[in-house]
Structure formats: structure tokens, C-alpha cells
Image (cartoon, rainbow, N blue to C red):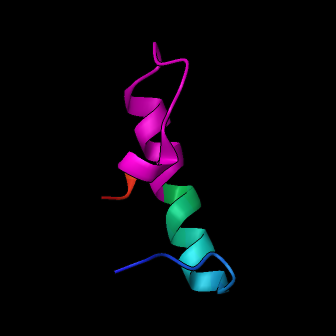
Amino acid sequence: MTYDPHYPETREYILNKLRTWLEDHPDTDVVRITTFFL
């Protein structure tokens, strides 16, 4: 299933997921979004 950030609920989900992931991995400099949501 693909993610369509055009929809507000989906955009919120993606941003929350990314924020959480970044907080859990503070030493990471680069994130490949394509693999993050697989």
C-alpha cells in the first residue's frame, strides 16, 4: 500500500512516525524515506 501525504490524516501519520523514529535514532544523519515506510 502506498502513502499519499495529500490526505491530512496520512500526512499526520507519516510525520508522527518520522518524528518518533528520529527521536529513537539521534545519531542518524540521513534517512531514506523510501525504505522507512516499507
Q: Is residue 30 above or below residue 10?
A: above
- Residue 23 image position (x, y, % from top left): 47, 32
* Magenta residue check for 27: yes
Q: Is residue 4 left or right of residue 28?
A: right
Q: Is residue 10 left or right of residue 24?
A: right
Q: Is residue 17 left or right of residue 10?
A: left
Q: What residue is drawn where x is 45% and y is 55%?
A: 17
- Residue 10 image position (x, y, % from top left): 54, 79
Which quadrant does the N terminus fall into? bottom left
Q: What residue is drawn where x is 58% and y is 83%?
A: 9
Q: What residue is drawn where x is 48% and y is 75%?
A: 3
- Residue 11 image position (x, y, % from top left): 62, 72
Q: Which residues are magenta?
A: 17-35
Q: Is residue 29 above or below residue 19?
A: above
Count of numbered tags: 0
- Residue 31 image position (x, y, % from top left): 50, 33
Which quadrant does the C terminus fall into? bottom left
Q: What residue is drawn where x is 63% and y is 75%?
A: 5
* Magenta residue check for 25: yes
